[in-house]
Image (cartoon, grey):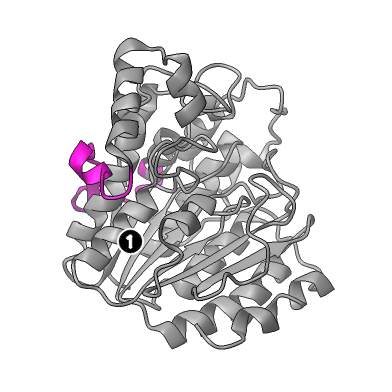
Amino acid sequence: MRPALLAGAELYRQSSYGSGHPLAIARVSATLDLIAALRWCDPAQYRVAPLARPDQLAGFHDPGYIRVVQRAEQRQRVPAVDRARHHVGANGNPVFREVYRRPATSSGATLAALDWLDEPGVVYSLPGGTHHAMADRAAGFCYFNDAVLALRKALAGGMARVAYLDLDAHHGDGVEAGIGADPRVLCVSIHEAGRWPHSGAALRPAGTRVRNLPVPAGFHDADLRCLIDAVVVPLLRDWQPELLIVQGGCDALADDPMSGLALSNGALWAAVAAVRDLAPRVIVTGGGGYNPWAVARCWAGIWATIAGHQIPDQVPAAAQAVLRGLSWRHRLGREPPEHWFTTLADPLRPGPVSAAVRDLIAPALDGGP
């Protein structure tokens, strides 16, 4: 098992997008608390995510846009012209107390992960995964795009081949727009067809190494395993990236309210395990996820997969206390079943691989990476 580091920040403990927003829930802090309760992280493995500097954010983002987000935090409001142009304070991207510091910390975590990987290993950037942000506008609850920033930094530092794998239920449109045209980047996104942001069709953009795999509603464990084994692993083995970033959003889980997909968390753990050793340096990030119990249990299990811990059949009392202390006060929330408090692993969700999934394999492999 290669060295593994875990990045987080206390900022997320008190930060919320506001009541009623899907990101009003505890995610990073809940996951860190659960990992601590399970005694799965030695202090030497933990890293505090730094705040990315404006000049670092400018590795992808327009300086004027960065200033707009800074001013939004300082003033807690956005002029109408900036709101219309940059979508800060609009379209689900609210102005809240840490509207600059929170996304700057998400980007800081993933950028710093590159520096921490001075030799082969894996970093879990829990705050990262903000894959919808565009160069000059917020999108999909994302203000700065940590993956694009890190991939650009890696290429500028001399890497010749990098790769990005997106497991979120929503297409990683900001990453594709920000770096997908670069021939040094293999960019693979598995996402729900027809779901916001309504991009990511299976058609391969000409002259790129982009592979979009839009999957049908009801996509289950066997479907994901098929795409990982038949498409993702062969592409990565052929490409031999020096760096792999895996966006580990968990809104494709059956228990998440923001997609029609039907995965168990074990399917995502297996996907991470399948690609974990296919690049010398790997960064796994967070991402989407809007059920606090599903997120904490899934992301804790991803860390177990990365760091070599055994998933218990039942979690100890301290971990149960963390899970019982979570709340979900949202119209999409529901009463948690008892197993959300007592276990990490979901029941498996097997089934026959759908024809729609099988039809994605050959076009994705055509012509190699």
Q: Work out which quarter of the rendered image holds the N terminus and state it.
A: bottom left
Is 25 within the magenta? no
Is 43 within the magenta? yes
- Residues packed near mark 1 inside 10 Å, few (<14), some (14 to 19) or many (20 plus): many
Depth check: 169 or 136 in front?
A: 136
Residue 180: x %, y % from top left = 46, 64
Horizontal side of residue 154 vs 16, given as left or right: left
Q: Is residue 351 visible?
A: yes
Horizontal side of residue 62 vs 215, given as left or right: left
- When the figure is inspected, residue 102 is found, relative to residue 37, above or below; the finding is above
Q: Residue at 45%, 36% (x, y): give it.
A: 137
Depth check: 263 or 41 in front?
A: 263
Disc 1 is placed on an element classified as helix
The part of the image, by quadrant, that contains residue 67 is top left
Residue 346: x %, y % from top left = 65, 53
Horizontal side of residue 13 vs 46, given as left or right: right
Residue 29: x %, y % from top left = 40, 34
The part of the image, by quadrant, that contains residue 95 is top left
Horizontal side of residue 135 vs 187, given as left or right: left
Q: Residue at 18%, 71% (x, y): give it.
A: 119
Residue 59: x %, y % from top left = 26, 50
Q: Which residues are magenta?
A: 36-61
Residue tagged by mark 1? 151
Q: Residue at 45%, 42% (x, y): give it.
A: 133
- State how many labels appear: 1
